[in-house]
Image (spheres, rainbow, N blue to C red):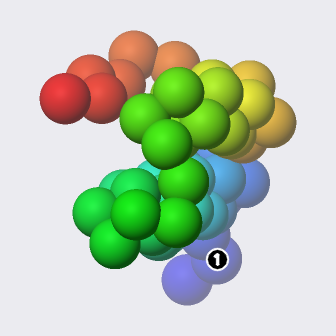
């Protein structure tokens, strides 16, 4: 079964978001940097209708 491009992008985004959350938690980036990078990732991976709480 082949994965759709949309699903592949969603999975890649979730992976990158979890990694960002981790490096924020250990103090390597600030909350502001986390938010900026997350916004860039949302745009790059073309993510729609996602709750980022």
Whether residue 40 sits left or right of residue 9 in the image: it is: right
Q: Residue furthest top?
A: 49
36 or 13, which is in the foreground? Answer: 36
Whether residue 40 sits left or right of residue 11 in the image: it is: right
Q: Tell me if residue 24 comes above or below residue 46 in the rendering.
A: below
Q: Residue at x 60, y 36 (%)?
A: 33
The C terminus - image quarter: top left
Q: Residue at x 64, y 27 (%)?
A: 36
The residue labelled by disc 1 is: 2
20 or 43, which is in the foreground? Answer: 20
Any part of residue 13 in sight: yes
Q: Find residue 8 and report its horizontal and vertical position in percent.
A: 62, 62
Whether residue 48 sits left or right of residue 3 in the image: it is: left
The quadrant holding residue 49 is top left
Q: Residue furthest left?
A: 53
Kindly state the secondary structure of the residue where label 1 is placed: loop
The N terminus - image quarter: bottom right
Q: Tell me if residue 30 comes above or below residue 36 in the rendering.
A: below
Q: Find residue 39 and report its horizontal and vertical position in percent.
A: 63, 25
Q: Find residue 2 and report its horizontal and vertical position in percent.
A: 64, 77
Q: Residue furthest right?
A: 44
1 or 44, which is in the foreground? Answer: 44
Q: Residue at x 52, y 19 (%)?
A: 48
């Amino acid at each position: 079964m082949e994965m759709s491009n949309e699903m592949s992008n969603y999975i890649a985004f979730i992976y990158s978001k979890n990694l960002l959350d981790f490096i924020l938690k250990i103090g390597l980036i600030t909350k502001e940097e986390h938010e900026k990078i997350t916004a860039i990732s949302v745009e790059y991976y073309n993510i729609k209708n996602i709750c980022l709480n």
